[in-house]
Amino acid sequence: MSEQELMPIEQLLPNNLFILPVTGNPVFPGLFTPLMITDNQDVEIVNQAIKHGGFLGLLLVKDELEQEEYTQANLYTVGTVAKIVKKIKLPDGGISIFISTLKRFETKQYYPSGPYLVAEVSYLEDIEDEPEELRAWTRLLLTEMKQLTKNNQLFSEEMRLNMVNIDHPGKLADFIASILNVDRKEQQGILETLIVRKRIEKVLVFIKNEQNIAQVQAKIQARVNQKIEKNQRDYFLREELKSIQQELGMTTNPKIELINRLKAKLKGLPLSAEAQETVDREMTRLEAMDPSSPEYSISRTYLEIISDLPWKEPKSENFSIESARKILERDHYGLKDVKDRILEFLAVRKKKKDTKGSIICLVGPPGVGKTSVGVSIAHALKKQYFRFSVGGMNDESEIKGHRRTYIGAMPGKIIQGLRITKAKNPVFLIDEIDKMGVSYQGDPASALLEVLDPEQNSTFRDTYLDIPFDASEILFICTANSLETIPRPLLDRMEIIELSGYTSEEKLAIGKKYLVPKSLEKHGLSKNEIKYSPAILRKIADEYAREAGVRNFEKALHKINRKVALLLEEQPDTKLPIVIDEDKLLTFLGQPIFVEDEILKADRPGMAIGLAWTSMGGDTLIIEAQNTPGKGELKLTGQLGEVMQESVNIAYTWLKAHAAEHKIDQSWFENNAIHLHVPEGATPKDGPSAGVTMTVALYSLVTGQIIKENLAMTGEISLKGKVMPIGGLKEKVLAARRNKIDTILIPQFNKRDLDKLDESVKTGIDFHLVSNVNEVLSLAFPNDGNRGEMQKIIPNQPAPNTEEIASISAAVAQAVREALRER
């Protein structure tokens, strides 16, 4: 063998080590032991250490409190270097490693290395005194330890053999310190002691303490053995008694056992006077009933439910705002305003130390993460959560329970949730609160009024229980797509937090960070088998999943991954990774659902683009108007609601009233009928915010002009031409971005809403604030040279000949229409 092959491993130790924080107790040198690692970051540290030689630095954490990450400040400076001998992957994603601990080290300084801790270290040597004195100390240590391990089941024979075979005093002291039941800080003190004699002295002190504890334990064991002998005698006698009773037909009564068990469970519960009286009365009835009676099972179930409820006061909440922020940032991308609102809510809750009256309602389009935000709040508060949906619910008994007189009666969802979570202050997620129905069985929304009212739910009375229960400690989080269908009294009880749709950039980031890894794991694929480029992810979001949320985006990724999984099974020799390009995208997903040609364009007279808000998010809609010979009739199609029909009539009236100002001949209205249509006729539409768009479409039709390219608008108009404010501005702007709109007209009153929008939402779009219809027309038709001249007449001077102007304007409009027909 070469000299290099015979070199001791201690001489190969590196100067820089990857540091693995150790909770529990410190690890001593000279051991061969397994380590179980479940944290993802710790697993990555081990993998990095294996790549760089297999040496790992083990440092004890100063505090065992749960932390997101460890830094130099909360780690001890003296630890143990270990050689990783073997690594085994576990089914839950963690690993088990076998290490051989070699030597003590002390950290000098830490180097920045991303998420890993890397430190420069110096290795520490044992300091030995006089050999003879040290040998005496060693013998004393072995003698005391043998006395301690004698007749002690906690110390195995293997431990005793290992202890005898260790010939180095320092390593012997380390081994004994590692197997003693010593406080972690005291063990760290032994690890930091380099003088072997002092180390042995410390270990001897702990051995003496263990010997004293063992003596007391032996006395206790003797007393326990006496009791056990008595209990065993009693047990055998009872078994004999049971046998005698069975022989004589005197078997024990299961009813008595049930009643005793219920009494034991109910005995320690802090019930109110009314509840205690009800329980005592029901227990008396149960004792008097025959088990075969139908009422028996009803009473038994009633008492079991009461005994299972969390009547005791909960522990005080223990959460940090910083931890809550990290959880929200980890689970969701973007949503800055929403996260700030939630953190403000939690800060008030923590500052006030009052958990009552806490009701949140998360409102937004489907797929934007309302339910997952609610779950993240529960995780941030470190609480149990119970989720149930009230969508389509039309029976108030689902909320407040059924009367016990009915067969199969059960308590409502509130009591069921408390029974399942076994906590008095859980988080309740109530999904789809805007989709409750009403029937002859009652109104669930009205039943929720008592549940969600902080003034009433402290004495919430479920119909099944019929005794008051304090539900004020529950944190209620509701989700809804729209506030329109939620009853006003119920809405007043909730704190509203709105979640808007995502921009293309946000969808791209969500896809890369969350959706792609989640979908790959769901379909059993790895990153080495399939690859998505940012351009492809953006193409999927824009052409196959153009929506407010990311649900269809995720479905498209699932579809691709399913087809890739099938391809890899059928053709195992396929070259990896499979790069998803435009050709493969077309093969896997088919033709795009949203293409450039389907982007709405107002490229003819009588057309205008409006912005609408729906419960599914924002949307763009095209308004089409066409004239035919007639006598001023106005025909509306496209399933327009009453409010939208009124907006058309207001726009038509305003245009006729101001025709002279815009050089429009009144005879045009007398000789033409107008048909106004909003496409997608199967979809009902309503709301006042399309008033401005209706006016522009009608003006475009009458004057034969085409509105400015890539321009959209929203706003309600009054009969005098004033532009009124609208709602849902962010959703409408996001819809405009999806439709390649670069200019948007919004009411002057919505400037406050515009200022609240993120720059990422407003970038690339010109916003114009308008207060009246004339401003709208000037922006929509920048080349309308004759507009507004009638408004500039100087007082006391004769006005121009309006009849002549109207005649010329009508002739020009007729010529434009004929030219368009020929085209």
Image (cartoon, rainbow, N blue to C red):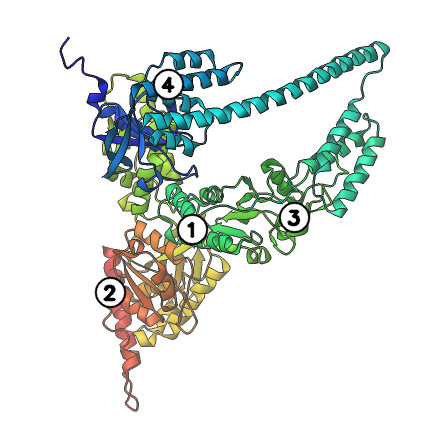
Are dots 1 and 2 in contact, CB under 8 Å? Answer: no
Q: Between residue 618 and residue 58, name the one nearer to us.
A: 58
Disc 2 marks which residue? 815
Mark nearest the camera among 1 and 2 is: 1
- Residue at 44%, 39% (x, y): give it: 65
Distance from disc 4 to disc 2, alpha carbons, whole Å, reads 120 Å
Can residue 594 be seen here?
no
> Where's the N terminus, which quadrant?
top left
Mark nearest the camera among 4 and 2 is: 4
Where disc 4 sits, the SS reads helix
Q: First in sequence: mark 1 or mark 2?
A: 1
Disc 3 marks which residue? 470
Are dots 1 and 3 in contact, CB under 8 Å? Answer: no
Mark nearest the camera among 3 and 2 is: 3
Distance from disc 3 to disc 4, alpha carbons, whole Å, reads 69 Å
Residue type highlighted by circle 4:
Ala
